[in-house]
Amino acid sequence: MSTPTPAAAHTSVLVINSGSSSIKYQLVIPDTHEVLASGLVERIGEPVGAVKHVAHGETTRRELPVTDHAEGLRVVLGLFDEIGPDLGQAHVAAVGHRVVQGGARYSGPALVDEDVVRDIDELSPLAPLHNPPNLTGIRVARELLPDVPHVAVFDTAFFRDLPAAAATYAVDTEVATTHQVRRYGAHGTSHQYVSHKVARLLGRPVEELNTIVLHLGNGASASAVRGGRAVETSMGMTPLEGLVMGTRSGDLDPAVLFHLYRNAGFSVDDLDDLLNRRSGIKGLSGVNDFRELHDLVEQGDAAARLALDVYLHRLRKYIGAYYAVLGRLDVIAFTAGVGENDDIVRAGALAGLEALGIEVDLGRNAGRKSEPTVISPDGARVTVLVVPTNEELAIARQALEVVGAGRA
């Protein structure tokens, strides 16, 4: 007897994250959090692409040419037909698409129509590395799955209503208005998910909590959340500002750019490449994988030690600043790849902050955390947690709410 698909009794959402040369996807049941399938198409446009599809507890890997995103999504849908689960039986209520930049226009998810498509396209100058491939994924998916509603979920939406004092740059008002220069933030889907998850974990109303969320991955961002609403975030008009990241510089005196342009012959494209791809941990140490970085530190590598010190210094500075912005701090939550898996970074980021009521229990902190974990001592004034993020689940929930198919 065949086992009935778990989706038979539940509504599912297909979540698509289309990058410049990749497509990530998950088939999720929002109300049970179950992932029916997931996968990744990489090296789109190269002579040989790589495809991974995980379903029924098994992983299928293939190498084949994937000429473009249309072909990539056809491959994905073919794997659902061949290996499963059958999308026709999975009660797919919506396709949820991650979109990085929603500008000042979107404070929440949006049902995709031609107006939304046009808006995403017009906002591409604010996220030139992200919005164009996000939009390509939407266009292709709408062609291949025309009978299912598509929903855009914006990384910037959680930060759209930042207080004006936090969102506004001190540059000429007319210039800023004309060219949409303001703080938009990024990783908002993760920051919103984690800050609300914290409240559920602690059994407290989100409206009562002041929380700092530290989303630490290859890209890294911090947010200050008061009563469930973001009041500050470290990423700015683009995801380059803020914390030190894997390959991005984070905060930098803008005059550095003038200096390199005028005196070192750097073009605008050279500066873009330097700050986005050859800076951060990689620029300082030569590596951007924290496991390699820690190995180098243990071997006595001075550049690696400096890179880690700079990274932790910037983190502590933002924690202190956001504590001041909030006025009272209840929770610090670490999330994303580094935040969830690197106990050295977690302990180092909070070292020396005991006078602020921020402490780490080294035993509780040890090791990777695949489940929500309190890592502060009992009775600490500020609760410190590791909360694994789940952006795909958050996108699925928001997509389901938009199409009116129920609430997860």
Image (cartoon, helix red, strand yellow):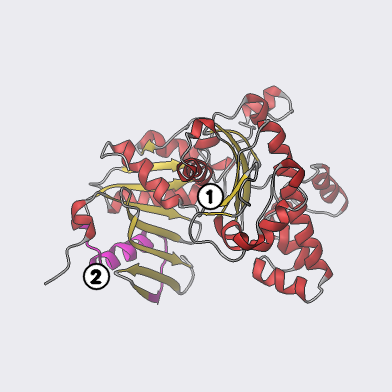
Q: What residue occupies the far right of the structure in this picture?
A: 263
Residue visible at 61% across and 26% down in the picture: 163
| Percent of width and height locating residue 60 | 35, 74
Helix, strand or loop at label 2? It is helix
Estimate how packed mark 1 is, as few (under 14), some (14 to 19) or many (20 or more) residues with alpha carbons within 10 Å: some
Observer able to see residue 247? no
Which numbered disc covers residue 130?
1
Q: Is residue 79 rendered to the left or right of residue 246? A: left
Against 108, residue 351 (above or below) is below
Q: 126 or 81, which is in the foreground?
A: 81
Question: Taking the image as drawn, is residue 336 in sight?
Answer: yes
Quarter of the image holding residue 108?
Answer: top left
First of labels 2, 1 by sequence position: 2
User: Residue 30: where, in percent of width, then height?
Assistant: 33, 49
Query: Mark 2 packing: few (<14 Cα in 10 Å), some, or many (20+)?
Result: few
Amino acid carrying label 1: it is: His
Q: Amino acid at mark 2?
A: Glu
**What kind of element bears circle 1?**
loop
Q: Which residues are magenta?
A: 61-88
- The quadrant holding residue 179 is top right
Give whichever of 119, 372 is nearer the camera: 372
Q: Is residue 176 above or below residue 63?
A: above
x 53%, y 42%: residue: 124
Residue at 84%, 69% in the rendered image: 302
- Please name whichever residue, 105 or 235, is drawn nearer the observer in this view of the structure: 235
